Image (tube, rainbow, N blue to C red):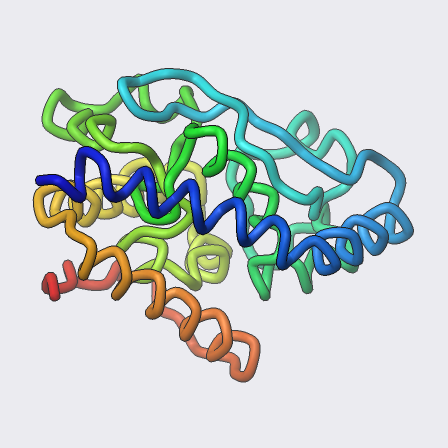
Amino acid sequence: MLYRIYGKRLLDLCCAAVGLIVLSPVLLAVAFAVKCGSKGPVLYSQERVGRASRIFQIWKFRSMISGADKIGPLITASGDSRITGIGRYLRRWKLDELPQLWNVLIGDMSFVGPRPELPFYVRDYTPEQRQVFTVRPGITDPAALEYRHEEEVLAKAADRERYYREVVLPHKLALNLEYVQALSLRYDLTLILRTLGAIFRRSASTTTISETPPKTSSLP
C-alpha cells in the first residue's frame, strides 16, 4: 500500500529525472534524425486520458509524416505509408516513446501503468474497465508486452479499426485491470525488465504473428 501511494511516484520522479539527464545525448541525436528525415516538427503530441479520466498531452518523437492523423486512421498498422523512414527504426526500438520521460517527470504518467488511450476509445469503456483510471497511465504495461507486435496483428485484419476496438482493446483492458489489482514494486520492476528484454529481442529477430489475441498472462 505504501508503494502504491508514495513509493511508485517517488521512483518515477527519480528515475525520470536521471533518465532525461543520462539519455540527453540520445534524445538530441534522435531529434536531429527526425528533423533531417522529413519535414515537420520533431515532437508529436496527442490527447490521451489519464488518471481520474483527466485529459493530458502525451509526447513522442514524430515517427510519421506531419499531419498523419488527419489523413488516415487513428491506429497504425505495419506497413503504414505514413510512417517515415527514420520512424520505422524509432518505432522498432521504441525510441519514439522517450519524450514520455517528461510526462513521467511532471506526473501525467508512470513508468509502469495502463497505456493511455484516445478519448475516442475511452468513451465506450464499461464502469469496470474505467478502473484503469485509478492509477497513472504508463510507458509500459502487461498489455504492451502481450501486444508488442500489435502493428503486425492489425495489418492482417480486414477492418483494423473495428478489430482493435472489439478484440484487441477489451483484452488489453482485462490485462491492465489485473495489473491494477496486483500493483507492487516487484511487479513493476519485473515489467520494466521484461519490456527492455522484449525491445532488444524484437530488434534482433522477426516473428510470425497470428491474428488471435494471446491468452491472459499469469501475474508474477
**Left or right: where does residue 176 sit relative to residue 210?**
left
Position of 123 with respect to 16 (left or right) is left
Q: Which residue occupies the foreground of this view, 154 or 104?
A: 104
> Looking at the image, which residue is at 78% across and 40% down?
42
The image shows residue 78 at horizontal and vertical percentages of 57, 58
* Residue 34 as seen in the image, left or right of residue 14: right
For the C terminus, the image quarter is bottom left
Location of the N terminus by quadrant is top left
The residue shown at (39%, 32%) is: 117
Q: Position of residue 25 (x, y in %)?
A: 74, 58
Residue drawn at point x = 49 percent, y = 36 percent: 105
Q: How many marks?
A: 0
Q: Residue furthest bottom?
A: 205
Query: Horizontal and vertical percent for residue 202?
Result: 50, 75
> Is 32 rendered above or below residue 113?
below
Coordinates of residue 111 in the picture (x, y in percent) = 39, 47
Instruction: Name which quarter of the figure residue 191 lies in.
Output: bottom left
Please say if 34 is above or below 118.
below
Q: Which image quarter: residue 176?
A: top left
Residue under the image location 60 percent in, 43 percent down: 99
Lateral position of residue 90 relative to residue 140, left or right: right
